[in-house]
Image (cartoon, helix red, strand yellow):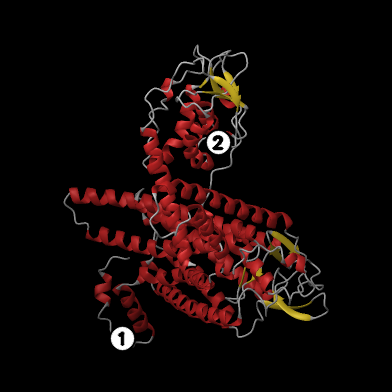
Amino acid sequence: MKQIQLAVAFLLLLGSLAALGNELTNLFQQRPDSPHTSPTDLEQCEPLDTNILPLCKDIAYNETRFPNFLKQKSQQEAAQDTALYLPLIRINCSPVLKLFLCSLYAPPCVKNYSSTLRPCREMCQKAKSGCQDIMKKYSVPWPDYIDCWKFPSFNGPEACITDDNYAQTGAQSHQRTFSLSAPATASKLDTSFLANLTPEQQQMLLNSLIGATNSDPVSSLPKQNYYQLYAAAIAAAAALQNQHQSQSQTHQQQRVKFVCPPPLQLITDTKNTYYLTVNDEHVTSCGMPCDNNLFDQGEISFARSWTLIWASLCFSSTLITLLTFLIETSRFRYPERPIIFLSACYMVVAMAFLIGSSSNTNAIVCKSHKNAMMQTREYLVQGVEHLPCTLLFMMVYFFGMASSIWWVVLTLTWFLAAGLKWGHEAIENISSYFHLAAWTIPGVKLIAVLWLQKIDADVLSGICFTGLRNMNLMRGFLIAPLLLYLVLGACFLLAGFVSLFRIRNVMKHEGNKTDKLEKFMVRIGVFSIMYMVPAIIVICCYFYEQSSYNKWMDYWLKTNSIELNLPPDYVSTILYESDRGAMIFSLFMVKYAMLLVVGITSSFWIWSHKTVSSWQRFFDTVFGCFGTSFAPKYKHEAAV
């Protein structure tokens, strides 16, 4: 298969460069400088033979006049030149190129008009502007003998040929100008699909190319075969592209609507809270089995252990941060205090993941239901009927969104302190508004999801969330707000850094030390990176999930069609692109880790000897276990 791909690529490259490089350049350089020859008595009208001039097929006239302005005396002679333009016609670099070339090489014979008509200058310029770039790509100049300025203007005294579009939208038409319809051409050839061809299709293309050149694809090709090779490559690629597009359109048109099969149809779902999303359609009272879902048991076991480790680290780290704050609250004033509330939010999120991932059973994410086959089977929970699932969802979603808002508040307070020179007390005076926003906004969104009853069980992590089976909910309740909070925080952060850099420059100019300020700036920068990088990765994971979900469901239905009793006519119309490979299991593991790692890195702000002093003073006070050697030093230190 690799050899075939290399051969096809080699042939396409040779054909493209040779056809548009050697043959066209040589031809263009050999043309006479002046194309315009006055009509002579030898000019005769004759039928336009498209078998000789396939370039002029479907053109808007059927009679031509020879000799033409290039001193060619027959259609056979003109055909030798026009054949070299067929690749440009095929890729449709200009919609008027075909009409322009035909009117140049085989000018129309108009009744009651004795002179030979030439194409208008404007049509020549339109053809040149569309095709010149692709010709330059292969180092082929626009031919000198087709100098657009040598042709008559649309509004000039001499009659000429133009296309209908220009005649309708251009300036006032000359009464002797002949307007013709440019023939319909195919859309521009898109060869990007060639990378995804099946081995059979690749072999078909290779055979077409070898048959056109009668030569081995890896041998040196004689010059006279270059154009045939290029034309064959274009034709074969176009044929395969049309076949590929028609197959996809046929699949889309014939796709049978999904009907929930009896093993998935829940007769005990009286509130219609269960549903499956297949091909962007929601089928109600249809559930996903716990023992046969998108992931196998080995993946589920690994995911539970993975999230348990990260949740444990997150919970421990945030717990230490909160306890450090409680034993010495005066150290954490605004603008740093939002870090404490951010850590508290992540501690609750980690607690929910600990509960879900530490469960050896699926008691939280699964619930028994009776299906249409009168079998009692466990299905992944949806809706609000299962209290443990609902509670874990409330913990993760509410405090997860609140942590994102506290990030925005943190960057805002940094900006107020650094950019607007607000003091601790001034910022603390408006802290009630920060709390109002940080707890109210997630609360409103939480109530909305509960009212919609759109809670989904996550079999991998053992918790419940929203938007796992409804991509519209994922976009509206997860991706959009998280992206908004991230951008807002980044803007405040950038504005704050700009202000800090200005302050630093002023201090340096005045000869003051900037060590503490620079240390503070580094800490802010490191903490911001530790938050923003995981947040960006999580958003990217959600983007990938919502774009790939339909393929995952198609794959699951196709591989389990026999067990699910799916009708054969439905299975046959599932798109062949459905692939389990699109469901990257490691991506989910990265998402869970990034959801929890911020709680771990949030303790970065308290990593200092002052924290050690605080804990030693605390233990000395409570247990009398340690000395007070750090106490005098601590009293002279400025608060963090």
Please give the name of the residue rendered at 50% of the width and 23% of the height, measured from the top-left corner: 67
In-front residue for pair 624/39: 39
Dot 1 corresponds to which residue?
A: 626
Image check: 238 left or right of 598?
Answer: right
How packed mark 1 is, by other alpha carbons closer than 10 Å (few <14, some 14-19, many 20 or more), is: some
For numbered disc 2, what is the local secondary structure? helix
Q: In the displayed structure, would residue 413 be above or below residue 135? A: below
Q: Residue 425 is drawn in which quadrant?
A: bottom left
List x then y, in percent, for residue 259: 78, 65
Report whether residue 227 is seen: yes
Question: Residue 267 bears which disc, if any?
Answer: none
List x then y, in percent, for residue 114: 56, 14
How packed mark 2 is, by other alpha carbons closer than 10 Å (few <14, some 14-19, many 20 or more), is: many
Please give the name of the residue rendered at 59% of the width and 41% of the height, measured from the top-left corner: 186
For numbered disc 1, what is the local secondary structure? loop
Q: Residue type at mark 2: give it.
A: Leu
In-front residue for pair 203/260: 203
Instruction: Pick out the residue farthest to the front.
Output: 42
Can you tell which of label 1 and label 2 is closer to the viewer? 2
Spatial CA span between label 1 and label 2? 96 Å
Image check: 606 left or right of 291?
Answer: left
User: The C terminus appears in which quarter of the rendering?
Assistant: bottom left
Question: Residue 55 bears which disc, if any?
Answer: 2
List x then y, in percent, for residue 7: 45, 60
Q: Residue 265 is drawn in which quadrant?
A: bottom right
Instruction: Pick out the residue farthest to the left.
Output: 511
Q: Residue type at mark 1: give it.
A: Phe
Disc 1 to disc 2: CB gap under 8 Å:
no
